[in-house]
Amino acid sequence: MTVLARLARTVTWGDCDPAGIIFYPTYYRWMDAATWAMVAGAGFPPARMRAEHFTIPLVDSNCAFLSSPVFGDECEVRSQVSRWGRSSFTVSHEFILSDGRVLARGTEARVWCRYEAGPGSALRSEAIPQELRAALGAAPA
């Protein structure tokens, strides 16, 4: 996997279930955080997204759990855009423990949208900006 973004995470007690292993929704929170960090690093931080009335709603997500980290483990989320469409893109994530073991793999499908009348109003999909595509390694559309 060609990594475009890396996000370090430490498994906190709040990330765990009563057995002390990571609770599965944690992976989904981390995927969301990694995607937004990648988009921000590509020149579209949340402040710009709000000002220009853009957002990237999630339309599909999955995660395969391969191993269970525990409270205190150091992990890294490695992310890349694995598919580009006109207005949609898929981000693939790998969760790696500090010893190199793969903990999980997941994907998110997102759609590039603009609020019709500002944040909170109806959404309309739009073509993904060339600026974002170029920053994240896509061929011109």
Image (cartoon, rainbow, N blue to C red):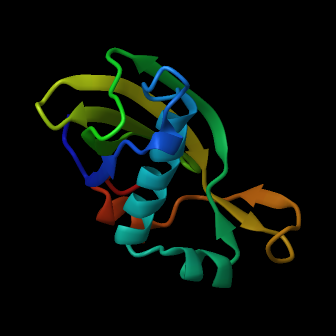
Residue sitting nearer the eye, 125 or 70: 70
Quadrant placement of the C terminus: bottom left
Q: Is residue 114 visible?
A: yes
Foreground residue, 92 or 96? Answer: 96
Number of callouts in the render? Answer: 0
Q: Quadrant of the N terminus?
A: top left
Instruction: Give the left or right position of residue 62, taking residue 57 as reference.
Output: left
Quadrant in the picture for residue 69: top left
Give the residue drawn at x 17%, y 24%. 101
In the rendered image, residue 119, in percent from the top left (x then y), is placed at 79, 73
Q: Could you tell me residue 105's position as x and y percent?
A: 36, 25
Placement of 62 over or under 50, stated as above or below: above
Q: Position of residue 14 (x, y in %)?
A: 52, 43
Q: Residue 64's quadrant in the figure?
A: top left
Q: What's the residue at 49%, 20% (across, down)?
A: 19
- Above or below residue 23? Residue 32 is below
Whether residue 89 is visible, yes or no, is: no
Question: Is residue 56 found left or right of 64 in the rendered image?
Answer: right
Residue 134: x and y in percent read 32, 63
Q: Is 1 on the left or on the right of 27, as rendered?
A: left
The residue that appears at 54% across and 48% down in the rendered structure is 86
